[in-house]
Amino acid sequence: MLEKLKKSLEESPIVKKGEYNYFVHPVTDGIPLVEPEVLSEIARTLKKHATLDVDKIVCVEAMGIHLATALSLETGIPFVVVRKRQYGLPGEVGVHQTTGYSQGELYINGIESGDRLLLIDDVVSTGGTMIAVLQALQQMDVEMTEVIAVIEKGAGKEIVERETGLKLRTLVKVDVVKGKVVIESALGD
């Protein structure tokens, strides 16, 4: 299961951002090339294993968009994007997020009290973005039915679960060892 995703991860180049080992991958960066077979494999796996009794899929700009699109097309569930741009629409909620390598503002629109939501993002490593978004959503009186990061690296999953009280499902857990991405575990293995 997830053979195309795992193979593409193992072939990922690594760049250093300070002390952070950052792997460059189509799912997490949109480069070098996003293969439709990898996105289809992810969407089919999520359709099979995720809780999909939701009103909306929520993703975070930018790298959650293609994942939410693929999952939306596979399931017929509409999605909304947490954006990096403020629109000033009624009910807009601002969120400050800090990761291991950046920080900034995000804005939530299109979510209503009582919505049942599935949040999907590309990667959890430090947990900063996901924690900020989930805490904001929790304050909006919604039901977080499922929280998913396709790729897990580092301690972010545990941090997200501890800080939000929500279970985080990941499809593939990776580490960077001696300049290479190593698959530690994958859903279905």
Image: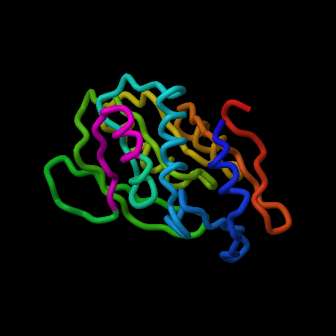
Q: Name the residue at 52% across, 37% down.
A: 164
Which residue is at a point 78% across and 45% down the rendered structure image? 184
On the image, the x and y values in percent for residue 52 come to 41, 26
Side (left or right) of 43 relative to 143? right
Residue 48 covered by magenta stretch: no
Which quadrant holds residue 107?
Answer: bottom left
* Figure coloring: rainbow
Left or right, residue 32 beside residue 132: right
- Residue 3 drawn at (x, y percent): 67, 44
Measured along the vertical axis of the image, is residue 30 above or below residue 2?
below
The image quarter containing residue 128 is: bottom right
- In the image, the segment drawn in magenta is 68-83
Which is more toward the observer, 91 or 53?
53
The quarter of the image holding the C terminus is top right
Residue shown at the point (33%, 31%) measured from the top left: 142
Q: Is residue 108 above or below residue 114?
A: below
| Quarter of the image with the N terminus in it | top right
Left or right: where 120 falls relative to 77: right
* Quadrant assignment, res 13: bottom right
Residue 169: image x %, image y %? 58, 35
